[in-house]
Image (tube, rainbow, N blue to C red):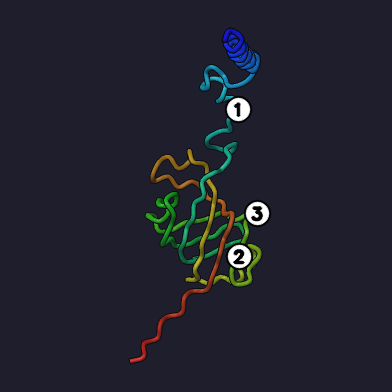
Amino acid sequence: MKIKLFLAGLVIAGLVVSSAVAAPPDGKGKPDDPGAAGKAHKPDASGPNCKPKITVVLRGTFTSASSTSLAMTVVGANRWGRAWKTAGTATVTLDDHTMVRGNGMKTVSDLVARMKDGDRVLVQARVCKADLKDATAMPTLTASKVVGHPAKAAEENDD
């Protein structure tokens, strides 16, 4: 019986020693004050150095376009695009990284050439969450994707 008690004590002592050795050395692991050390490595919440993480989706009708921007009448939006829906219009910046799709379009120049007033358009753009803190805030949008389709045909009445 004494041997079993001795072996049980030896196993417990081995577990205690191994957990003490496994603890990270000073200066490694999680910081004691997460507010002090964690903020130095985070990117800016807004401004030119922020990393956009929020996708704004706007749905509406095409108004006009140039090689660098797109104007539209907004009729629908996701939760992040409510301010543009309330305003009823949006102007979105287009760049070289903007993907253009729909009805055979592949580039921004195809969009400008093929879209007519009243065609349907869906725009996806990314912004920083800090820029949308105010419910009425409307920061500049740079489109990451634009999908365009011709306007729906009017229904015919067969009376």
Residue 25 - label: none
Q: Foreground: 73 or 40?
A: 40
Q: Quadrant of the C terminus?
A: bottom left
Dot 2 alpha-carbon crowd within 10 angstroms: few under 14, some 14 to 19, many 20 or more: some
Residue 41 - label: 1
Quarter of the image for residue 28 reads top right
Dot 1 and dot 3 residues touching (CB under 8 Å): no
* Mark sitting earlier along the chain (1/2): 1
Residue under the image location 65 percent in, 14 percent down: 21
Label 2: which secondary element? strand
Residue 14, horizontal then vertical, whole percent:
63, 14
Residue 24 appears in the figure: no
Residue under the image location 40 percent in, 58 percent down: 88
Q: Is residue 86 above or below residue 45?
A: below
Residue 30, horizontal then vertical, whole percent:
58, 21
Q: Amino acid at mark 1?
A: His
Find the residue positioned furthest to the left. Answer: 159
Real-space Cα distance between discs 1 and 2? Answer: 37 Å
Residue 101 - label: 2
Residue 50, horizontal then vertical, whole percent:
57, 38
Q: Amino acid at mark 3?
A: His
Q: Determine whether, in the image, residue 43 is placed left or right of residue 76.
A: right
* Mark sitting earlier along the chain (1/3): 1
Dot 2 and dot 3 residues touching (CB under 8 Å): no
The residue that mark 3 highlights is 97
Label 3: which secondary element? loop
Real-space Cα distance between discs 1 and 3? Answer: 27 Å
Label 1: which secondary element? loop
Residue under the image location 43 percent in, 60 percent down: 74
